[in-house]
Amino acid sequence: MLELILTQNSTFIIGPIAKVLGYVMQGIFWLLDKVGIQNIGLAIIIFTLVIYLLLMPLTIRQQKFSKMSAIMNPELTAIQAKYKGKKDQESMMKMQEETKAVYAKYGVSPSGSCLQLLIQMPILFALYRVIYAIPAYVPQVKEVYTSLVDKIYTNPGMVYFIKNKLSSAAMFSKQFDNTKFEVKNTIIDVLNRATHKDWAALKEKYADLATDIDSVKGKLDHYNNFLGLNIAFSPKDMIMMEFASDHKNWGIIIGAILIPILSAVTQWINLKLTPQANTNNNDNGMGSSMKMMNNLMPIMSAFFCFTLPAGMGIYWIAGSVIRSIQQIVINKHIDKMNLDEQIQKNIQKYEEKLKKKGVIGTGLSDKVNGKSYGTVKDALQKSEEEKKAEREKAQAYLNKTEKKKDSGSKSLADRVNMVKDFNERNNK
């Protein structure tokens, strides 16, 4: 059976990654403690920065794929048009080979973008898990609870009281009944989400431990204080607690409202800066779906950050800001790349790879010779200009056809041929 420390995640893949990331978080908190800064909010920001810097190589690959996809899409479309309607094995193989050669020319893999996401997703889920359950991964924070929990644990009826009288116990009710979870660790989980009312109820129930309870709560408030907000609580809870108080702290209320708003805004900016792989949205509606998802994600982010502990909101905001800065830096780096030199290197590498398989002469060099791409930025601009020219050409053809058309004399067959003729020209 896996050893469980509090609620450390034991899920396949995510669990082990979360444990490794937990050591990173532990090290950061230990270093901050050594310089006299005991602050979970700051530790989360530094932790997020470190992880995203480690993920930088994957981010570069993903953005490069998106940029190159936009440039090479016309070539892929031309190949599809060339073999349109041809279902014989020889044509399908040639189409596959030519498509593969285009990807090789631009130095990207057809599964490149998906692969980067598949690698990043479990890391990001594990990152979320560590931040959501700080005491499970940072011993210094867990130790704050330990002595108090040991004392409470000796009292009769303690489990019943914690489970049924503290509101924060509701989300952990199943853990109390599951033998694989240690009861003391579950109590720490409950106290880690305890509201002011929960702490007051605990203090009233165990009056003889009032000094210990105040000491633990004071230390936790110090650890969780970030710009005047207690990041162990959700913005929703903070606002409700302040409105329930006789002396409202409007600074806390405004700060709590700003967390979900900043989360949505920073994520929206990040999405706008992220290059999107070019999709043939006229054929399959993928572009519309992506646009809808990009509009919904900031809203969903705001909702989650409003209901989850504010520490998660700080993670979300920090992550979006860091990613946005990465996007700007990486985009500038990729845009300045000399695409001509890069393509020649890619072709040489591809041909050497084929030679080992006994294939000589791909014809790629002949197609590229005499053609200048310039920088990646230049190639992207040319790609957009070519698309615009094609659209204008198609529109001009339609206008010309409309002028010539005599609606009274054209037969149905003539109209069908006209549409067919236009489609063929447009595909070319």
Image: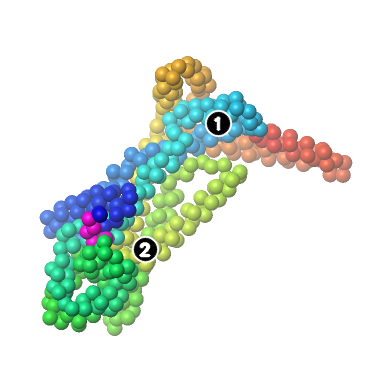
In the displayed structure, would residue 135 be above or below residue 73? below
**Number of marks present in the image shown:** 2
* Horizontal side, residue 164 vs residue 348: left or right: left
Residue pictured at 20% horizontal, 57% vertical: 138
Provide the residue span drawn in magenta: 3-7
Task: Tell me the quarter of the picture where residue 181 sits.
Answer: bottom left
Q: Amino acid at mark 1?
A: Glu
Instruction: From the image, tell me which residue sits under label 2.
Output: 305
- Can the viewer see residue 109? yes
Residue pictured at 43% horizontal, 46% vertical: 274
**SS at circle 1:** helix
Q: Residue pushed farthest right? A: 409
Q: CA distance from mark 1 to mark 2?
A: 43 Å
Q: 417 or 152, which lies in front?
A: 152
Task: Tell me the quarter of the picture where residue 301 sits.
Answer: bottom left
- Can the viewer see residue 188? no
Instruction: From the image, tell me which residue sits under label 1.
Output: 75
Q: Amino acid at mark 2?
A: Cys
Residue pictured at 53% horizontal, 35% vertical: 73
Q: Position of residue 208 (x, y in %)?
A: 12, 81
Q: What's the mark number on residue 49?
A: none
Quarter occupied by the C terminus: top right
Q: 106 or 145, which lies in front?
A: 145
